[in-house]
Image (cartoon, grey):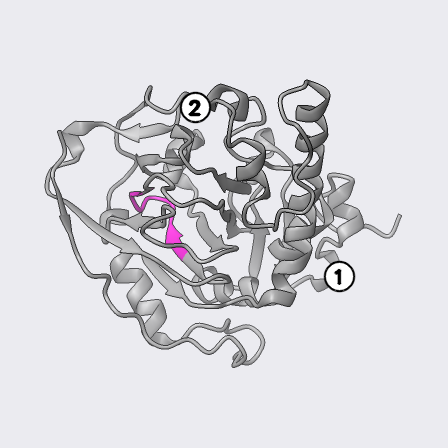
Amino acid sequence: MPTETQLRPAKPAPFDPDKVRSAGFGSLSREQIAFYDTEGYVVLEKLVNEEDMLPFRESVNVRVSEIADDLLLAGLIPHKFESSPFETRLADLFSDLTDKEFLKYGRSWRDRLTGYFQLMSNPKIVDAVESLIGGEIFSNPVYNTRPKVPKVAAGAVPWHQDKSYWPGANANPVITVWISMVDATLENGCLHIWPRSHRNEVLTFHAETRTGTGFTEVDDVHMRDVRTVPLPVPAGSAILFNDRCIHMSTPNNSSAIRWSCDLRYQPTDQDPMSHLGAGFLARSRKHPERVAQLEDWLQGMAEHSDR
């Protein structure tokens, strides 16, 4: 079995989300970029505010309401828990149900809803990404809304590299932007990072069998002297990490949902991974007229077109 040594996270340089550099340079400081290059990740506390998160939450509520309607119709719940707050409603819906009934709706959601696009195209996020990969930015089609439900096995995600989820991965430098929509804590299953593991290529892996989801998991042969850095962060914080960086998250032992989303961005000259869905041009300093708008994305278009 792997052995773990828990470390305190290295302290990144302070980040001011309201202080954005001149166009073309992104918003991260030299210290933050150097930290990312060395450690494989960087934490940007409270990168987005309540106003930024509201459209995302509204889109999430659309999906949760659909699930409530379905469960009520099936006779599995007594009512739709419409008075429950955002943080607990989904947990209330599944409080007396099984993991299997939860997994019917998927371990993560990738709906094409307005609030998701507004978050993925948010300048605060794209500015930060620009600091790492430049001003020609493609929003990868693999974005996920993550409802980590209390006491559900699928909430625990094993040690893995994001690159293990797409073929030809070594050729694609993809930045993962993980955002917590509520406070992510040790109790509700915050993200854990293995710093400097991004220097590895894609390691051998297998489909784990504990959660019922088939998450990819790095093979035990690579998991010696694991260095664990837990990253509890307040709501609205972003953790940017290289998609070769090994990471995981623990079970949710609280009474509320740990809502998060993971977005991905890459340079426009890389494989758009269209076999996994439709991404979109999030920023172009060379061709700003081509940047996708909401209407383009809703129709599965990668770039803007004056049709």
In the picture of the structure, the residue carrying the numbered disc 1 is 289
Q: Is residue 242 magenta?
A: yes
- Which residue is at 51% across, 27% downward? 96
Which amino acid does the dot numbered 2 rest on?
Thr
Residue 238's spot in the image, x, y percent?
A: 45, 60
Span of residues in magenta: 240-248
Residue 32's spot in the image, x, y percent?
A: 35, 70
Residue 199's spot in the image, x, y percent?
A: 24, 48
In the picture of the structure, the residue carrying the numbered disc 2 is 213
Q: Can residue 285 be seen in this view?
A: no
Asked if residue 33 lies left or right of residue 74, the reply is: left
Which amino acid does the dot numbered 1 rest on?
Glu
- Which residue is at 65% across, 49% downward? 116
Q: Does the magenta stretch include residue 290?
A: no
| Vertical side of 108 occupied by 124: above or below | below
Disc 1 crowd rating (10 Å Cα; few below 14, some 14-19, many 20+) is few
Asked if residue 195 lies left or right of residue 215, the reply is: left
| Vertical side of 55 occupied by 156: above or below | above
- Which residue is at 66% across, 28% downward? 78
Q: Is residue 25 visible?
A: yes
Disc 2 crowd rating (10 Å Cα; few below 14, some 14-19, many 20+) is some
